[in-house]
Amino acid sequence: MEIQAQLNSAIFEHMDSIEMDDWNRSGRVRDKWQKYRSGGEKPAGKKKAPHKVEKLSPRKGSGSDAK
């Protein structure tokens, strides 16, 4: 009987830690969803690419080429 109680306790502790991790993750997802629904932030993973790439202009009158 004592061994069964020890096994049950070990299993319960392991499953409890898994459940707490899941509860924590679900809470974070719920918070982000509520912010998204209220217009507070955009959903993660949908980042827009820049429209155009800026070209760097060559420097005039500086560097080792300047005399």
Image: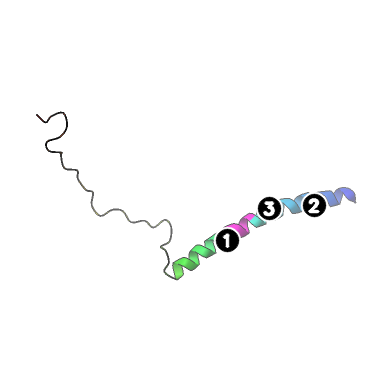
Mark 3 packing: few (<14 Cα in 10 Å), some, or many (20+)?
few
Compared across the picture, whether 9 is left or right of 46 comes to right
Which region is colored magenta? 21-26
The answer to which quarter of the image holds residue 63 is top left
Magenta-colored segment: predominant secondary structure: helix
User: Does the stretch in magenta take in 25?
Assistant: yes
Going by the numbered disc 2, the residue's amino acid type is Ser
Q: CA distance from mark 3 to mark 1?
A: 14 Å
Q: Residue at x 54, y 60 (%)?
A: 28
User: Does the stretch in magenta take in 65?
Assistant: no
Q: Is residue 11 above or below residue 28?
A: above
Compared across the picture, whether 7 is left or right of 45 comes to right
Mark 2 packing: few (<14 Cα in 10 Å), some, or many (20+)?
few
Q: Which of the numbered marks, if any, corresponds to residue 38? A: none
- Position in image of residue 44 (x %, y %): 43, 57
Q: Residue at x 65, y 56 (%)?
A: 20
Q: Residue furthest left?
A: 67
Q: Does dot 1 land on a helix, a strand or a loop?
A: helix
Q: Residue at x 80, y 52 (%)?
A: 8
- Residue position for label 2: 9
- Position in image of residue 58 (x %, y %): 15, 39
- Residue position for label 1: 26
- Residue position for label 3: 17
Earlier in the chain: of badge 3 and badge 1, it is 3
Q: CA distance from mark 2 to mark 1?
A: 25 Å
